[in-house]
Amino acid sequence: MHALNSFEHVFWRVLNQLSCSTVFSAMFDNEMEESLSGTIKTVDVSYGTLRAFVNYLYTAEVVCLDQQLACDLLVMADKYQAQHLKDLCQKFLVSNLNWNNSLSTYTFVHQHNAKQIINLALTLITDNMDKLTTGEEYAELKEKDPRLIFETYEKCHEDLKKCHEDLKAKVAFLTTSQPDSFSDVVLFAPDGGYAQAAVPVPAHKAVLVSRSPVFNAMLENEMEESLSGTIKIRDVSYGTLRAFVNYLYTAEVVCLDQQLACDLLVMAEKYQVHHLKDLCQKFLVANLNWENSFSTYTFVHQHNAKKVIDAALTLIIDNMDKLTAREEYNELKEKDPQLLFEIYEAYLSKQVNKAAAQKGSSASYPPKYNWGGMYIEEVPD
């Protein structure tokens, strides 16, 4: 606790006229204890901070301002409504803000309505959430003030929502409809049946070239497709071709189902449209279950769709007892025994790892593995 002396009391009367502090103005304009005694008691502040505060009221300067003093003076400026000093402290804290001190600064200034810093600190926090959530300060704040943590996550959600809306707007701006006129190339699906093969899918060379390096090679060089303005797409239906070309214009697939996802994945791989391939893989993974895991795994294995391969293989080895009784299993055993071997290799690897973790604690050790009706026993060392 510190007191201002009588000389400073006289100065406060002058400052009252200058409106440096509405709080001090109220003290001295009315017959309050401070006005009568000529003494102002300041609580919860160090002598150094008080001296710097009074000095600022005389000189509008702070000597040797650092992070701690800026925080202490901001508290006093907020309490005594010295707005100019509060602005000075906020500017200093903003200029020294970084992701390391953003959480502690945000927690502090949130108590003192320092809006300029609150917004910037919150932006830094949301931009570095992955780093900050592993620190001690985050854990402490979660215990002491969960409401504040909720506000930071709310800001993250708002930022993501805004980012999503911005991206949607950009996509909408860049998206063009599939052309019915002014096209300079047509695509055909000659293997899609007589009626379907007769229907061309119009497009623009510029769009095809920009979306696919394969089309780029076709149309940039004097190949048949470039000279004739016609591209024949074999082993694909008209509907799939139409959906594929539409995607190149809109980055969307209407009414995507399992079959169309598989067909488009093949085209996306063939013409190196990676974004479409990723979209098809996500759809197939989302619709994967133990019943279609075998057929999906067999299909995607031919098209290097690693995300789907890994997800399907996990489902297969988790449901091996059910799948070995299905017709698909017997067909694969005839058509592609190498693929079946890879499945069993992954299955046995999982079983061995599981057994190794349980070694010494399981009464049934050494374990036996069911491999298509044969039981294989692991012999301990």
Image (cartoon, rainbow, N blue to C red):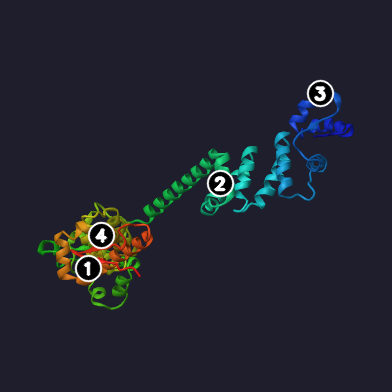
C-alpha distance separating marks 1 and 4: 11 Å
Residue lying farthest left? 194
C-alpha distance separating marks 2 and 1: 49 Å
Q: Secondary structure at mark 4?
A: helix
Say whether disc 2 or disc 1 marks the residue closer to the N-terminus: 2
Q: Can residue 204 be seen in the rendering of this structure? A: no
Residue designated by label 1:
340
Disc 3 residue type (three-letter) = Glu
Disc 2 residue type (three-letter) = Ala
Displayed quadrant of residue 268: bottom left
C-alpha distance separating marks 4 and 3: 83 Å
Q: Residues within 10 Å of mark 4 (few under 14, many from 20)?
A: many
Displayed quadrant of residue 33: top right
Q: Secondary structure at mark 2?
A: helix
C-alpha distance separating marks 1 and 3: 92 Å
Q: Position of residue 287 (x, y in %)?
A: 26, 53
Say whether disc 4 or disc 2 marks the residue closer to the N-terminus: 2
Residue lying farthest bottom? 222
Viewed as shown, does residue 46 lie left or right of 323? right
Residue placed at 30% from the left, 77% from the top? 221
Say whether disc 4 or disc 3 marks the residue closer to the N-terminus: 3
Disc 1 residue type (three-letter) = Leu
Is 352 in front, or is 106?
352
Residue placed at 70% from the left, 36% from the top? 78
Residue designated by label 2:
139
Is 371 in front, or is 314?
371
Residue 33 is marked as 3
C-alpha distance separating marks 4 and 2: 40 Å
